Image (cartoon, rainbow, N blue to C red):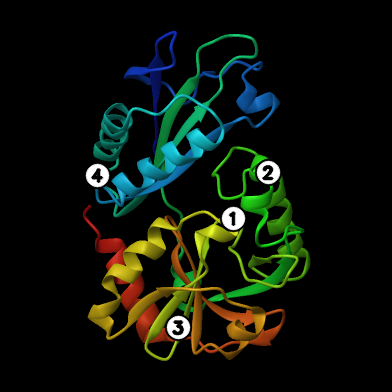
Amino acid sequence: MSAPEHLVLVEHDVEGHATGWVAADPDLPQVRVTDVAATRGDGVFETISIGSGHPQALAAHLERFARSARMLDLPEPDPTVWADAVRALAELLADHEEAWVKTVLTRGVEGQPLPTGWAYGTVSGDFRRERTDGIDVVLLDRGLRSDAATTSPWLLAGAKTLSYAVNRAAAREAARRRADDALFVSSDGLLLEGPTSTLVVRRGTELLTPPAALGILPGTTQVDLFAAAPDWGLQGRVTTLTPADLAAADAAWLVSSVRHAAPVRSVDGVESAIDAELSAAMNGFLRRRLR
């Protein structure tokens, strides 16, 4: 039996302001082939976890959605309209413990003034293996210095754009190396992020993550985990990290909205320690979030 799919189209006026949304059939064509989403990857998106009908970290996702839109000079997404659309889809998925909704905003059809927007929701996959057994990770050079976001803002480092060819290529390279995922490293040797995830490292009683100033996406899941860290006797801290720091860590995870916290069990073929108790606590917390 196929997973349920739901779609709404977000409508805009000629000035690019969202005016509301309408339900649409996900099995019918909805986006024109000349939309720059298809021809240029010129747009932004967010993926929001849905727990039993409750959008999780919705405000943080919509803030990041707006941040990415500003970086691409797109119209500012109206948080009220988009939040209403996400909640409507979440209600349709309330019978499922884990689901997700993706919001998309593009510059629209080439040569026309109207942006294109939609939100799509469906049920999450089964990530029990990744959350318990862990994942094998390879380090990949991103080819950019850690200060690229400052020196070259036109590269859009740290924006969540539809231009995902590099991230998909990194995932394929990880698979070629018999790994489950990749972790990007800057050309000057600092750890960055995964193609679809944020790095979190435990060192003693601290949880550590790289700073967004390195041109990486601010992690909504990481922020929630850091807020919960005191409940586990830990404190969160943002700091630069190197591959040597990762090798010496007590444990590490790649965290994301849908897969949640996947413990790293090896890096470039070298086995890493898994903190099974903390992994279970993290994933239990992430599944139960109601905000």
Is disc 1 in contact with disc 2, using a CB cutoff of under 8 Å? yes
How far apart are labels 2 and 4 at the CA level?
Answer: 39 Å
**Viewer can see residue 224:** yes
Sequence-wise first label, 1 or 4 = 4
**Residue, x 41% and y 85% (percent of image)?**
276
Mark 3 residue crowding within 10 angstroms, few (<14) / some (14–19) / many (20+): many
Q: Write down the residue under mark 3.
A: 202
The x and y percentages for residue 219 are 44, 58
Which residue is at the front of the view, 228 or 258?
228
Q: Which amino acid type corresponds to the residue marked 1 in the rendered image?
A: Gly
Sequence-wise first label, 2 or 3 = 2
Q: Which amino acid type corresponds to the residue marked 2 in the rendered image?
A: Leu
Sequence-wise first label, 2 or 4 = 4
Mark 2 residue crowding within 10 angstroms, few (<14) / some (14–19) / many (20+): some
How far apart are labels 1 and 4 at the CA level?
Answer: 35 Å
Is disc 2 in contact with disc 4, using a CB cutoff of under 8 Å? no
Please tell me whether mark 3 sits on a helix, a strand or a loop. strand
How far apart are labels 3 and 1 at the CA level?
Answer: 22 Å
The x and y percentages for residue 180 are 63, 67
Q: Which mark is residue 94?
A: 4
How far apart are labels 2 and 3 at the CA level?
Answer: 31 Å
Q: Which amino acid type corresponds to the residue marked 3 in the rendered image?
A: Arg
* Position of the N terminus by quadrant: top left
**Residue, x 45% and y 83% (percent of image)?**
202
